[in-house]
Amino acid sequence: MAHTWEQHFPWEGHRLLAQLASLDLGASAHHVLAYVSESLESRTALRKLVLQQGGPGRTARIRSAYKTAYFWMTEEVQPLWRRAQADRITLTYPVLSEAPFGRFLQEAYPLAAVFERARLKAEFLPGPTGQPYYHATLWRGEQELWSGRCFTPLAQRQAPDGRSVLSPTGWLTVRAGSTELSDQRLPTDGEAFWDWYVETVLPTVLGLADRRADGLVFKNLAVTLQLSEPDLALDVLDERISMTEALTEEVYFGTVDALKRHASMPAGTRTLTPGRIVPVAHAVSGQDGWARVILTEWARPPQAHRDALVRPPPGGTPGTVLLDRPAPPSRTWAHARALADEHRLEWHVPAHSVDGRPVPVVLRKDGDRPGGVLVTAGQHANEATGPVAALNFLPQLVETSLNFALLPLENPDGALLHQALIQVAPDHMHHAARYTSLGDDLEWRLRQGDRRWEAGARAWAQDQVGAGLHLNLHGYPAHEWVRPYSGYAPHGFESWALPAGFVTIVWYWPGHAEAARRLAEAIALDLQAVAGVVQHTQAALRASTAHVLTPHYEVIGGLPFILTEQPAALCPLTVITEAPDETVYGARFELWIQAHLSVCKAAVTHFQHGLHGTFNEPAPDGSARPE
């Protein structure tokens, strides 16, 4: 059974003009200041329409309602500091009791990178509590050159998880001299869509959840929309500003948040099985908006597959793997099988995805010697450098004497969806492909003791090699990650909202903290030799740390690391690589592959040279664990 909704949304530019026309302004001189969520080109065209509609005494300024501080600085203040030859800027950001402290410092990102490029020394300071304004002062030496402020329009709303948050909104102010003739909120196109989705679609989704006892909510939720919203690449780092991408994030994670709240589940759990959520959004400048939602129910619950419905080819040419972009599952399978054949390794398919695709394992098992290496990639399928790096690392593993199991693609259903999504929106993050087609995280499924479908492959591989070291290859967004209608930073993933370059995480069992730190130091030393990694990472660190009050990592050898005691990990030591690879292609994609390879090589080398000798202790729960 399928449910379908369609809705049209009048363009906010037309609504602005209609609101102005409804005001009794006469022929008096007045100034219009409007905030709309539009690109610069669209706002420039709209300003002309506003001036044409008014009398000869009308002036107008049209600012961005989304990322207000960034656009105010780059469009209005930047020409001033260039003309005045300023060498320093002070930017004061709002502090509001209804928002987390530092939220508006983060919303001004990536201005620190813009100031650095302009060789403008910058200082970011909190403003007076309760005033929704950014305030800037330009200096040359100790001489104040200019000072001004910019209002940031906000609306109170309830996020899908029940929290009260502040979100960006549009605004219209009309003044004649010092007299305020109008000052009112003007909802944006993005707000119109989101409010409609929350009020119209989500109740049906929650109703489906109430009807099912097996935890499965729906099979597929497809959301397609087009809105006149900004979607543009910036000229600093790999950054972009995209309200259309942000709306796809809201659809995906907002739906999940609403379901968790409805089921009284902890906000951080990843075991919810909502189904496949597929949002796609396009920017159509200066046009009315449109959305279609198709919700498909399960005809019957999914069953675990005994045989693959989709079989990988029996072999292939190792050189055919793509190195500069995400690879389709079929190409990953063929390359893995070819490498297994070339190096006379075992090839197994111990598990299949929910949709019946194989989850293969390349295995070398020489006797029952424990303390092997487990390599996994593609757990989150939109983090696309991991599978390519895993396959490129396999020949280096073969040169060691270690037993190993390598899973090049743990989430093939997500990978196939990712391939489809990057064809229509290559610059969007596509977290719709992050999890399995059930909507859960296969690692968290395994943590619950559920080995069905994709989770079974990792469990089987660990049983085979008794790994003492787990190399778990991941990625994260290469540009800012935003959820504008849920408190701005992505709820539950706030620490990953701003890119910080290549990040390495080391999980360790209790008692292995010293070993974990030695391993991190060895990894940092090898990463420093990969041209471009340190340079890009340190540039990203400078930009992101200026906009975050408390970074979530420590810096070792100039690179960010996270060292965490994790008793639930499969192995005494787990190394997780986090490459900022979502939405990057070409040379940058290849750079992160080299970074993954450097980490894997350093970890295995360190492991071989005696680190595994410390793994003879029992597991934290006292049970028998592999050495």
Image (cartoon, rainbow, N blue to C red):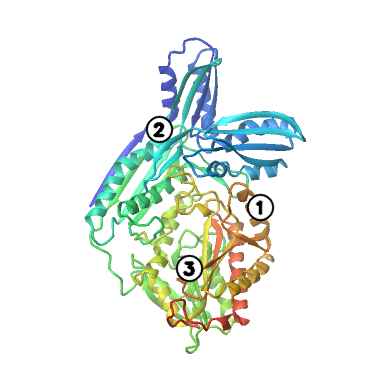
Q: CA distance from mark 2 to mark 1?
A: 39 Å
Q: Nearer the viewer, mark 1 or mark 3?
A: 1
- Residue on which the image places disc 3: 332
Determine whether, in the image, residue 475 is placed left or right of residue 557. Answer: left
| Residue 517 to residue 11: above or below | below
Q: CA distance from mark 3 to mark 2?
A: 41 Å
Q: Position of residue 464 (x, y in %)?
A: 44, 82
Determine whether, in the image, residue 474 is placed left or right of residue 297. Answer: right
Q: CA distance from mark 1 to mark 3?
A: 32 Å
The image's mark for residue 271 is: none
Tell me which label, 1 or 3, sits earlier in the chain. Answer: 3
Q: Nearer the viewer, mark 3 or mark 2?
A: 2
| Residue 276 to residue 45: above or below | below
Q: Nearer the viewer, mark 2 or mark 1?
A: 1
Q: Position of residue 534 (x, y in %)?
A: 67, 59
Tell me which label, 3 or 2, sits earlier in the chain. Answer: 2
| Residue 490 to residue 591: above or below | above
Tell me which label, 2 or 1, sits earlier in the chain. Answer: 2
- Residue on which the image places disc 2: 288
Residue drawn 69% across the image and 44% down it: 117
Q: Residues within 10 Å of mark 2 (few under 14, many from 20)?
A: some
Asked which secondary structure carries label 2, the reply is loop
Determine whether, in the image, residue 469 is placed left or right of residue 268. Answer: right
Amino acid type assigned to the residue bearing label 2 in the image: Asp
- Residue on which the image places disc 1: 539
Amino acid type assigned to the residue bearing label 1 in the image: Ala
Residue 300: quarter of image: bottom left
Q: Residues within 10 Å of mark 3 (few under 14, many from 20)?
A: many
Asked which secondary structure carries label 3, the reply is helix
Amino acid type assigned to the residue bearing label 3 in the image: Thr
Residue 219: quarter of image: bottom left
